[in-house]
Amino acid sequence: MRTSRGWWSLAGVVVGMLGLAASYLTAALLHVRESPVVAVAEGITALTPGAIAEWAIQNLGTQDKSALVLGMLVVLVVIFGVLGAVARRTWWIAVLGYVVLAVIGAWAVLAKPGSTGTEMVPVLVGLVVWLGGFALCAQALRRWEVVEASDDLAHDPAHTRRGFFLLTGGLAVAAAVAGALGRVAGSARGQAEASRRLLRLERVTPPVLPAAARVEVPGVAPWQTAADDFYLIDTAFIKPTIEPVEWELRIHGMVDREITLTYDQLVAREITEDWITLNCVSNEVGGDLIGNAWWSGVRLAGILAEAGPQEGADAVLQTSDDGWTCGTPLAALTDDRNAMLAVAMNGDPLPIEHGFPVRTIVPGLYGYVSACKWVVDMEVTRFDDIDAYWTQKGWAELGPVKIASRIDVPAQGSSVEAGTVVVAGSAWYQHTGIEAVEVSLDGGPWTRATLGEVPSADTWVQWRAEVEADAGDHLVRVRAVGRNGETQTGVTAGVLPDGATGWHGVSFQAT
């Protein structure tokens, strides 16, 4: 064999990427939300142990999904190259390899809730392109081998090599074009954004910040968090894009009456609005996975009362359009807290990233057990009968928010003028409320801080204190006291299984 193994590997890579691009374009044309690669990525995420998922959140943040997809593509390129090289001697192993990859893709798309079979079409298209494209490349390479080994001067080896390069180059261009067309065809997000911009929620009011909520210390996080700055933690690689006219919520299970709500029926109900702080269970002590916004929606207590939960029910299994699930205590959705199906954030329709057109907001619970974006299904049930997404990975079942506080000023490692030093930040204990905040300099006595005035127990509280710091290095810590008398513990614990604990401390230098 005169052809280099490298050319066979190149052919495998080019054909492999063409098959991926073809499946991506087909998914876009059929309005399938997830191409096979994305479906596999979400499948890997679902199977990832909790500790590894938590490591990715803490170390990669919002780039964790991009890193996984990039890693998958690198692995696939290697696999395609190996299949090409192997086919130089044993063609059927390459065919088997492509079939195995297609089976993995098929498993991933069919495992998604609500799969109709249409999701299989991109997988089949990708497989056909793989097999057909590689057959063409293999034929060109075999012809090259025959000509190189022949003494027949009528055949030009250079011409044969040129034919192979033109073929692979053409396939590479086709892959790039298919990928670009897939992005254009997959315009569902653009359509949803247009619908969102045109949506008018007549009874939703813009936020008005409470006059005394802010302590007016530069460097403290804004009391109201802008939508663009609000933390984002979810498992969707491609955000669901649901037109309001297509959205429905089914409430069923252990209820006397099953309910199906359309978007128009939902927003025609009485609208409730409230300042509510949300924070992630993955928020470490002093972390920024927290935000406060003006949410507008419809209270869930009234809707669930119409459904009539049956005796013995203690949970609601919420399901997102992308298949993510969370188990929420039924009591938290039906008590006096303002748990709602939210349709607006800070006076505007929900951003797509934050759950447009409808998401669930439940004060006092971590998001992993309550904050279902793109919610489409609620099953009233029992905790004993369900396994939600994050609880399968080791997180606790109930997820009540823990009392916490954070120092924003002075910043870690900063230098300030010796003397009176302003220390400020935020504290939160949703649905219980903050009674007091205290700071301690260098392990000394605790000093009470001045608190901002907040409209309810469901928001965070800004605070401000002053300490006297001589020249030198210092450490200031903070703790909060809840309205129920609970003092924030100084015992350090990680985020698993139900949220981090400990006092936040900041080191600074006074000069």
Image (tube, rainbow, N blue to C red):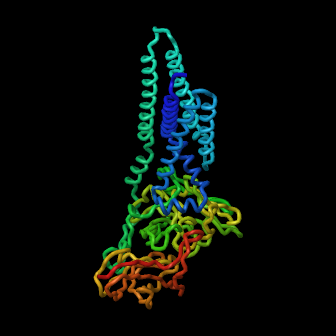
Q: Is residue 299 above or below residue 128?
A: below
Q: Nearer the viewer, residue 412 or 175?
A: 412
Q: Nearer the viewer, residue 479 or 230?
A: 479
Location of the N terminus (image quadrant): top right
x then y, percent, for residue 381: 67, 64
Q: Residue drawn 48% across and 79% down?
A: 503
Location of the C terminus (image quadrant): bottom left
Q: Residue drawn 53% across and 87% down?
A: 485
Q: Residue drawn 56% across and 46% down?
A: 39
x then y, percent, for residue 463: 39, 81
Q: Is residue 32 above or below residue 66?
A: above
Q: Is residue 271 above or below residue 167?
A: below
x then y, percent, for residue 109: 59, 44
Q: Is residue 21 visible?
A: yes
Q: Nearer the viewer, residue 262 or 492?
A: 492
Name the side, left or right, on which 317 lies relative to 26.
Answer: right
Quadrant of the rendered structure where residue 350 is? Answer: bottom left
x then y, percent, for residue 83: 57, 34
Q: Is residue 226 above or below residue 504?
A: above
